[in-house]
């Protein structure tokens, strides 16, 4: 299975600022994703991080608000830009490790509180 | 649009009981279904994955079943322990991609 780390694990930020979250995987993976979990809600996919090309965003999420980088097959960043209190959530990266069943694995998450 | 529902939203049982968590989904065209566990303040831990062609998967005290035609899955936990206390999430993956559609989860409390 993949070992996934995220930095920071948590942060408290002021509105109007930006935060970049890092996701590091211990092995090369083809597919990386960023999810958001708002308080009391389930996980929602923000975007697929594509290596060497622009990320693919889900409906309701835009690149200006959530720019994503994926410079190689083991690393990705998600930036939450011009933050507001509504951005307070847990942000999780996930990967599909191409084993026999293509199980999806998740990082420990980044807890963000925007004041 | 795929909708995933988990019932009950919360469950409290005494230690040692067997229990069943339910998951239903509206679109039966799924590639697989995964059950996760989420502890407070932590990420998700994958428990079981069932391919669309399979009926069930087992791991230790956990057994997950899938009835794709009726859009249902159950997670059976045998001889529950306080350490099983967590939120259990069900997620389905469509044929058309890797993005998972999650339910809101069942919050389980096992009391000593």
Image (tube, coloured by chain):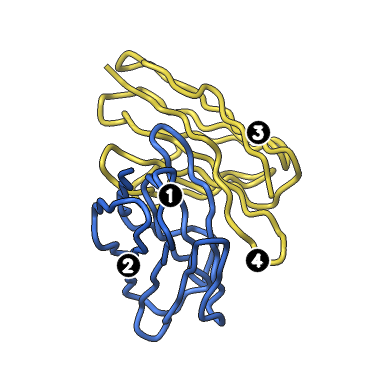
Chain colours: A yellow, B blue
SS under mark 2:
strand
x then y, percent, for residue A108: 52, 35
Q: Nearer the viewer, residue B20 or A35?
A: B20
For marks 3 and 4, give the one nearer the viewer: 4
Q: Nearer the viewer, residue B51 or B76?
A: B76
SS under mark 4:
loop
Answer whether residue A30 is visible to the viewer in this image: yes
x then y, percent, for residue B52: 53, 78
Q: Please tell me the numbered disc located at residue A45.
A: 1
Per the model, the C-alpha gap separating discs 3 and 1 is: 18 Å
Looking at the image, residue B96 sits to the left or right of residue A14; the answer is right
Q: Please tell me the numbered disc located at residue A101.
A: 4
Q: Characterize the local packing of mark 2: few (<14), some (14-19) or many (20 or more) Cα atoms within 10 angstroms.
A: some
For marks 2 and 4, give the one nearer the viewer: 2
Q: What residue would you read off at disc 3?
A: A24
| Residue at screen point 34% across, 33% down | A89
Q: Please tell me the numbered disc located at residue B108.
A: none
Circles 3 and 4 on the same subunit: yes
Q: Nearer the viewer, residue B25 or A44?
A: B25
Q: What residue would you read off at disc 2?
A: B22
CB under 8 Å between callouts 2 and 4? no
The chain to which mark 3 is attached is A
SS under mark 1:
strand
């Amino acid at each position: 299975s993949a070992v996934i780390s995220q930095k920071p694990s948590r942060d408290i930020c002021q509105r109007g600022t930006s935060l970049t979250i890092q996701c590091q995987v211990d092995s090369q993976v083809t597919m990386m994703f960023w999810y958001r979990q708002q308080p009391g809600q389930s996980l929602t996919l923000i975007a697929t991080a594509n290596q060497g090309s622009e990320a693919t965003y889900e409906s309701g999420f835009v690149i200006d608000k959530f720019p994503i980088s994926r410079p190689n097959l083991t690393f990705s960043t998600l930036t939450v830009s011009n933050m507001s209190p509504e951005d307070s959530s847990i942000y999780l990266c996930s990967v599909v490790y191409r084993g026999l069943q293509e199980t999806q694995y998740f990082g420990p998450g980044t807890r963000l509180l925007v004041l | 649009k795929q909708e995933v529902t988990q019932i009950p939203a919360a469950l409290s049982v005494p230690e040692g009981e067997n229990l069943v968590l339910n998951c239903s989904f509206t679109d039966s065209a799924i590639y697989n279904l995964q059950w996760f566990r989420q502890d407070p303040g932590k990420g998700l831990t994958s428990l079981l994955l069932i391919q669309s062609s399979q009926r069930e998967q087992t791991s230790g005290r956990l057994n997950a079943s899938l009835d794709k035609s009726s859009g249902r899955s159950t997670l059976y936990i045998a001889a529950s322990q306080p350490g099983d206390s967590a939120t259990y999430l069900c997620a389905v993956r469509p044929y058309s991609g890797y993005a998972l559609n999650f339910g809101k989860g069942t919050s389980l409390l096992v009391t000593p």
